[in-house]
Amino acid sequence: MANEELIYRITRAVYGRLGAGADERTVEALVMDVYRAVEPALAGAAEEGPKGGAEGRADRLIVSVFGTDHPGIVAAVSQILAEARCSIIDINQTVVQGKFAMVIVADISRAGESVAALKDRFRGEGDRLGVRIYAQREDLFNAMHRI
């Protein structure tokens, strides 16, 4: 199971238990704590399986979005990627009791701007939309979540 799918499943479970009134930052922290707790077991299983790609790629970007659901979130995030000439490789989003969570894996190999510039655009768009948007290269994302 991909790391992004596991994060989605954990997020859905947390919102399912805590309800619509759950604080977004608390949910994010709890999801990451749970993920970090199970990730070593997942990494061990990955080492036993086929090699290649577990460390992630520098030409892929992981974009995570959390917040209260409303129209336009997916469109706005996708628009930033399209304008930067990035392709969406995988996308998964869910809404649980009015709380929105999304993870996008994007190919940034043809990007017309730096990762830092994309992060700034996502941060500004997140502020405008009232959601939190995080972006990180896949290799750094995977390394950070192995610690």
Image (cartoon, rainbow, N blue to C red):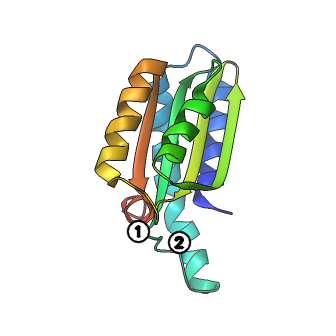
Position above or below: 85 against 134: below
What amino acid is at disc 1? Ala
| Residue in the image at 43% along x and 58% along y | 111
Q: Residues within 10 Å of mark 2 (few under 14, many from 20)?
A: some
Position above or below: 28 against 118: above
Mark whose residue sits in front, 1 or 2: 1
Instruction: Quadrant for residue 68, please give it.
Output: top right
Instruction: Quadrant for residue 49, please give it.
Output: bottom right
Label 2: element kind: helix
Q: Residues within 10 Å of mark 1 (few under 14, many from 20)?
A: some
Please give left or right for residue 21 compared with residue 123 in the image. Answer: right
| Residue in the image at 48% along x and 37% along y | 30
Could you give the CA–CA distance between mark 1 and mark 2, rounded to whole angstroms? 19 Å
Q: Tell me the number on the disc at residue 73.
A: none
Q: Is residue 37 visible?
A: yes
Position above or below: 81 against 138: above
User: Where's the C terminus, which quadrant?
Assistant: bottom left
The location of residue 51, given as percent across then percent down, is 57, 86
Q: Which residue is mark 1?
A: 58
Task: Say which of 29 and 141 sits in front.
Answer: 141
Task: Say which of 40 and 100 sits in front.
Answer: 100
Q: Tell me the number on the disc at residue 43.
A: 2
Q: Is residue 130 visible?
A: no
| Residue in the image at 41% along x and 68% along y | 58
Position above or below: 19 against 49: above
